[in-house]
Image (spheres, helix red, strand yellow):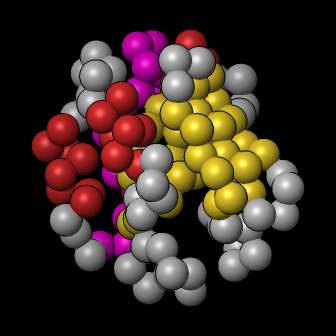
Amino acid sequence: MSQDPPTAQSRAVTVDDTGVRRQLADGSKEAVNWDELSAVIIRVMPDSPWDEDVFLMLAGSDGTGTAVPSSDPAADALIERLQTLPGFDNERFIEAMTTEADEAYVVWKAEGEA
């Protein structure tokens, strides 16, 4: 899971029944399948050197993952899907999306994850 350098901007993000895939402008790819999803973190970086300051970070139990900028056109569909996860913390999510604190907010963890 990367925190984008300026040259690694998204070319395309896909959210579907399999999971989330992100193709970067440099040709590399990031992905996480829903059945491997272990955590969802909202990373807020108000003083970010990039244009984006909020990322939806998805971690897979198999070591895969992706960081989707909240301004990406696919972010709304992603957020809608994430909010259906059992135990998703909507209050923490709202706090993360409305803060200017430089912090990572865990809004969901798979059952059994530390």
Percent coordinates x, y for residue 7 in the rendering? 76, 75
Above or below residue 100? Residue 58 is above
Whole-percent x and y of residue 40? 44, 38
Locate residue 71: give its quadrant: bottom left
Position of 39 compared to 21: left or right?
Answer: left
Residue 102 among those drawn in magenta = yes
Q: Is residue 95 left or right of residue 61?
A: left
Q: Residue at x 24, y 47 (%)?
A: 93
Please tell me in which quadrant of the rendered image residue 112 appears: top left
Along the line of sight, the residue nearer the viewer: 13 or 100: 13
Which residue appears at 56% of the width and 86% of the height? 49
User: How far from the left and from the top, in percent, is residue 37?
Assistant: 54, 24
Q: Can residue 65 be seen in the rendering of this structure?
A: no
Could you tell me if residue 79 is visible in this image? yes
Residue visible at 30% across and 34% down? Answer: 80
Residue at position x 38%, y 72% in the image = 102
Q: Residue furthest left?
A: 91
**In magenta segment, residue 72:** no
Q: What is the magenta range? A: 101-114
Give coordinates of residue 53: x percent, y percent.
43, 73
Q: Name the one closer to the observer, 10 or 40.
A: 10
When the figure is inspected, residue 101 is found, relative to residue 48, above or below; the finding is above
